[in-house]
């Protein structure tokens, strides 16, 4: 493969985002028309196809970025380009297996990892190769690591462990103990998300340091505090994921405290970075700057929602409603996706020296439409959740059909916002793919 494999990871990531969002749009029609596509591919196959594809966007793009930054920008010789290419090939082949599993309905995995469980073995192998390559490249060779190298390294290790942990249910002594099974499942999911967050937040700090041209942001006390907080959250933050597991209340309070503080610190890091940046530097990387500032706004909005959802009286009613979906999509699109789009924009600006993506009007319009439509999309989901919560309180007074009828305008708004969101993604991502494609035939550094 005489190709620049880090860029292929990123191009595949961008394609996964477009495909995943398109499947999301199809899934959203089911809210209004429950029989939509039922005979072709039912919602219980469409939904996991959507979530797996969008999670792949996060993983592939964060991974490609790390390979790219280390080899191309930091000029650190990679331990083995062949291992990196094998990692890519394993993920591509596994993707075929995963789509076959969803399309044929031969699934069998647990929620969020619904594909045929044996497919996790090649995924783990890919992560293992990534881990070996990362540590063999960095350990003992690069001294005095800034925080983002720690975040990437620990993110990889924890991902390998927690992805395995999420499959512990295959052992009968765990599967037969309901509480143990439920606790391990949700703990692993929380930590699994925490692991990719380390890769993504590490990327955000890397970008801030590079744009400012000052590495102190990656070495400052506040960044390391943020890292340890993220690590604590990854290990213990799961406790707030489910209220039905019987744990001591203080465990939940600590978990909440840690996850909320982590977000506050992240807002603080971006805010002080944005304030300290000269106008000239902002203009040189305008699109990257805009995406990072947008991610700050989305952290703030999701923090507000999470604080409200954490109030036990509210949580009792919001649990299992669209408010939870607003929380998951608000964070994965608003925070993870904006940071990763900042990363792709930065990579494009490094490849195409002359003009960055910000000079293309369609991308700038796409950026604004993306944020406005996401806001509508997010509010529609919250409104749908509030309607359901109110209906649950008055359940005896009205039927489920009446709830569906009264929620229809909200679901229509959700579908329209989702379609516009998808179009805005096309406006930004197609130019990104085009620019990356023209550079991906260059051989990466060995
Ligand atoms: C662009 C248009 C999109 C639409 C219309 C859409 C629609 C949907 C729908 C209908 C669901 C199922 C919710 C349910 O079970 O009731 C869903 C779930 C989900 N989507 Fe999207 N989606 C879109 C984009 C994305 C993107 C780009 C991401 C991430 C980067 C994402 C992340 C998720 C996640 C994590 C869930 C699972 C929610 C949960 O279980 O709480 N979506 N989406």
Image (cartoon, rainbow, N blue to C red):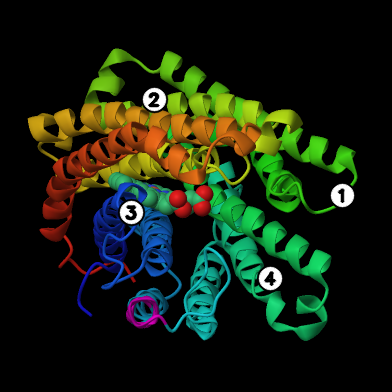
Viewer-side label of 1, 4: 1
Which numbered disc flags the more N-terminal residue, 2 or 1? 1
Give the percent coordinates (x, y) of residue 61: 36, 56
Question: How far apart are the two marked residues, 1 and 3, measured between alpha carbons?
Answer: 36 Å
Secondary structure under tag 2 reads helix
Question: How far apart are the two marked residues, 2 and 1, measured between alpha carbons?
Answer: 37 Å
Which numbered disc flags the more N-terminal residue, 1 or 4? 4
Magenta stretch: helix, strand or loop mostly: helix
What residue is disc 4 on?
Answer: 165
- Residue contact at pointers 3 and 4, CB within 8 angstroms: no
What residue is disc 1 on?
Answer: 247
The residue located at (52%, 63%) in the rendering is 112
The residue located at (38%, 56%) in the rendering is 54
Which numbered disc flags the more N-terminal residue, 3 or 2? 3
* Label 2: few (<14), some (14–19) or many (≥20) C-alpha neighbours in 10 Å: many
Q: Which mark is residue 30?
A: 3
Viewer-side label of 1, 3: 3
Give the percent coordinates (x, y) of residue 22: 25, 55
Which numbered disc flags the more N-terminal residue, 4 or 2? 4
Viewer-side label of 2, 1: 1
């Amino acid at each position: 493969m005489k190709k620049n494999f880090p860029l292929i990871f990123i191009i595949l990531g961008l394609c996964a985002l477009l495909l995943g969002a398109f499947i999301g749009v199809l899934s959203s029609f089911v809210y209004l028309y429950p029989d939509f596509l039922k005979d072709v591919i039912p919602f219980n196959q469409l939904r996991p196809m959507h979530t797996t594809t969008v999670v792949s966007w996060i993983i592939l793009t964060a991974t490609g970025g790390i390979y790219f930054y280390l080899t191309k920008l930091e000029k650190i010789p990679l331990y083995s380009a062949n291992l990196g290419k094998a990692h890519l090939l394993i993920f591509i082949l596994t993707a075929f297996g995963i789509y076959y599993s969803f399309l044929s309905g031969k699934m069998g995995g647990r929620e969020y990892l619904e594909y045929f469980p044996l497919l996790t073995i090649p995924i783990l192998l890919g992560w293992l190769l990534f881990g070996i390559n990362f540590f063999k490249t960095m350990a003992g060779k690069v001294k005095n690591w800034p925080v983002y190298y720690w975040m990437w390294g620990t993110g990889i290790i924890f991902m390998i462990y927690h992805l395995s942990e999420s499959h512990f249910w295959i052992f009968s002594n765990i599967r037969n103990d309901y509480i143990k099974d439920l606790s391990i499942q949700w703990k692993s999911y929380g930590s699994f998300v925490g692991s990719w967050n380390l890769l993504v937040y590490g990327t955000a700090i890397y970008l801030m340091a590079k744009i400012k041209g000052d590495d102190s942001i990656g070495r400052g006390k506040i960044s390391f505090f943020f890292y340890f907080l993220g690590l604590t959250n990854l290990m213990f933050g799961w406790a707030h994921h489910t209220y039905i597991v019987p744990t001591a209340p203080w465990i939940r309070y600590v978990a909440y405290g840690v996850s909320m503080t982590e977000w506050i610190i992240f807002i603080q890091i971006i805010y002080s970075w944005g304030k300290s940046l000269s106008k000239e530097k902002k203009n040189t990387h305008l699109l990257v700057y805009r995406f990072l500032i947008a991610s700050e706004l989305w952290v703030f909005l999701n923090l507000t929602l999470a604080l409200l959802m954490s109030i036990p009286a509210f949580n009792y009613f919001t649990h299992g409603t669209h408010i939870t979906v607003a929380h998951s999509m608000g964070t994965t699109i608003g925070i993870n996706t904006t940071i990763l789009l900042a990363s792709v924009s930065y990579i494009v600006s490094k490849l195409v020296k002359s003009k960055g993506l910000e000079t293309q009007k369609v991308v700038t319009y796409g950026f604004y439409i993306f944020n406005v439509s996401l806001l509508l999309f997010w509010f529609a989901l919250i409104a749908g959740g509030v309607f359901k919560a109110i209906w649950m309180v008055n359940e005896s007074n009205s039927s489920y059909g009446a709830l569906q009828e009264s929620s229809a305008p909200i679901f229509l708004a959700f579908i329209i916002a989702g379609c516009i969101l998808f179009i805005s993604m096309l406006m930004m991502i197609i130019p990104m793919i085009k620019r990356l494609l023209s550079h991906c035939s260059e051989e990466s550094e060995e």
